[in-house]
Image: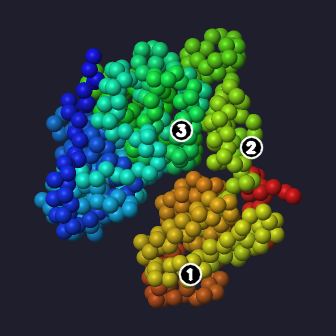
Amino acid sequence: MDLIEPYGGTLCDRYLDEAATRELKAQARDYLPWDLTPRQACDAELLLNGGFSPLTGFMGPADHAGVVENMRLADGTLWPIPVTLDVSEAFAEQVEEGSRIALRDAEGMLIAVMDVEHCWRPDRAREAQLVYGTRDTAHPGVNELMHRTGPVNLGGTLHGLEPPVHHDFRNYRYSPAELREYFQKLGWNRVVAFQTRNPMHRAQVELTRRAVRETEANLLIQPAVGVTAPGDVDHFVRVRCYEHVLRQAPEQTTQLSLLPLAMRMAGPREALWHAIIRRNYGCTHLIVGQDHASPDPGPGGQTFYGPFEAQELLRRHADEIGIEMVPFQLMTYVQDRADFVPANEVREGEHTLNLDNPEFRRRLREGLEIPEWFSYPEVIQELRRTFPPRHRQGFTVFFTGLSGSGKSTMANALRVKLMELGGRAVTLLDGDIVRKELSSELGFSREHRDINVQRIGYVASEITKNGGCAICAPIAPYTDMRRRVRERIEQHGGFLEIHVATPLETCEARDRKGLYAKARAGLIKEFTGINDPYEEPEHPELRIDTREMTPDEAAHRILLKLEAMGFIRNP
């Protein structure tokens, strides 16, 4: 029996032959270059290698509108997720329809040439509502779309020149054509795929075993290793965990393959997308569990999709996409049977044990015991190597507030108290110091303020990653940039945001540098609080008004918060 056909009947591999590549590379020296973002680089790789078949390039307005409105390309083909190349206004002004642009990766390597066939400005708010089902920027996909995506889309065919270079885990990186060839060689014509962005524990292993038995198929573990959700375990750690799990599987029945996918966390639509992609890789089945491709609950605990909404959408379109879904409920550990079973198969009176993700993370960060029924000792050991208990992690304390609110004074008081405690190197990244040492060429436009805060975030993340303490005290007036800094730092350690909520009138009355007076007189443009907004944090770890306590008292309160969070211990 032959392998399943790619979606649409043809694997759309966009790489040119050697002669054509050489010729186009020479021509591309004269093309306007665009440096792909990490998300765009993932999309480009799957467009070029056929993972996104039948797409042959970034979508134009007709395909984009059809996908957003009806989950259909312009020709009627089912496709649930927009795949577009977003660019800045400045870049779009330099591009003409009918021209070509050179697409480069993060290291500046030319990977493809794009025919610019379309240039348009989409309605991002409508796209968010229809694709993600919400405009709430607590959803990471919506936040990406609304705040981090360029205002202009370019659409057009891609011509592949060089596959992106991956220096990591090369033995697990297969293109669709390579994986199909591997399956053919082994005689695998029924393959069930398991999509994941998390480490696998015993429950997930049991789920895959049941799926294999039910479908009488071989198993492909294919984790997404492109852009995933903020706070996810990085793929280097996850792949080492998957290698431990692979040792539990019988030889010649299971394969690990890394998928360079930039996830959108779009829940039901994304589940459908995952199924289409897996068909292109030669799979006949896809495991879909509870909350498939859904983001973690928002700050208020709200969820964005129903637990089985993804299964319901995939079930409706299974015949059309030609890949079978293997649905599963949440797996729960039944102590009486010493085994994991789907929640709907637990018998009345049986004693069950559960360890949800928040509790697992708490135990991991506090160095507490994680029961052997939950995971494999080798996996836990791997995770503990990367995520030591909080008192051994680095952390960042990030003050934000108006000029004159007392950030710098409070930050310096905290620095002294932390140095008194000892145990970590402490670095103060005060707004004025950073402006002088790192950002002296920047002005005070929104773009330049964002660049300044990005630089602070980068330095703080490196300090945190290496076990130190970074204390930051910029104004940082914009919500999205503070969120970006948090996401960057929380990959490596702790983040404590402190809103110094001293009111504007108090800050203006202090005005030691005379800045507010100059702003009122029109001598300083775009001054935060006067003629430029300050977006107050909605969920800071602490909110402090310096009218109500001294810097010493405020620093003590912050130390108590750090102790409660587990980052410092009393001697």
The residue that mark 1 highlights is 437
**Disc 2 residue crowd, few under 14, some 14–19, many 20+, Cα 10 Å:** some
Considering only order in the chain, which callout, 1 or 2, is on the residue closer to the N terminus?
A: 2
Q: How many angstroms separate mark 3 from mark 1 (CA)?
A: 39 Å
Question: Residue 503: x percent and y percent?
Answer: 62, 71
Residue 32, can we see it? yes
Assign a secondary structure to mark 1: helix
The residue drawn where x is 52% and y is 40% is 239
- Tell me which corner region of the image, top left, top right, bottom left or bottom right, holds residue 170: top left
Assign a secondary structure to mark 2: loop
The residue that mark 2 highlights is 367
Question: Residue 412: x percent and y percent?
Answer: 72, 75
The correct choice, above or below, for 137 with respect to 529 in the image is above
Residue type highlighted by circle 1:
Glu
- Label 2 with label 1: CB-CB less than 8 Å: no
Residue type highlighted by circle 2:
Gly
The residue drawn where x is 29% and y is 63% is 34
Q: How many angstroms separate mark 3 from mark 2 (CA)?
A: 20 Å
Considering only order in the chain, which callout, 2 or 3, is on the residue closer to the N terminus?
A: 3
Q: Furthest residue to the top?
A: 348
The correct choice, above or below, for 106 with respect to 370 in the image is below
The residue drawn where x is 20% and y is 54% is 21
Question: Residue 225: x percent and y percent?
Answer: 45, 44
**Disc 3 residue crowd, few under 14, some 14–19, many 20+, Cα 10 Å:** some
Question: Residue 12: x percent and y percent?
Answer: 22, 39
Q: How many angstroms separate mark 2 from mark 1 (CA)?
A: 39 Å
The residue that mark 3 highlights is 198
- Label 3 with label 2: CB-CB less than 8 Å: no
**Quarter placement of the C terminus:** bottom right
Between 94 and 298, the one lying in front of the other is 94
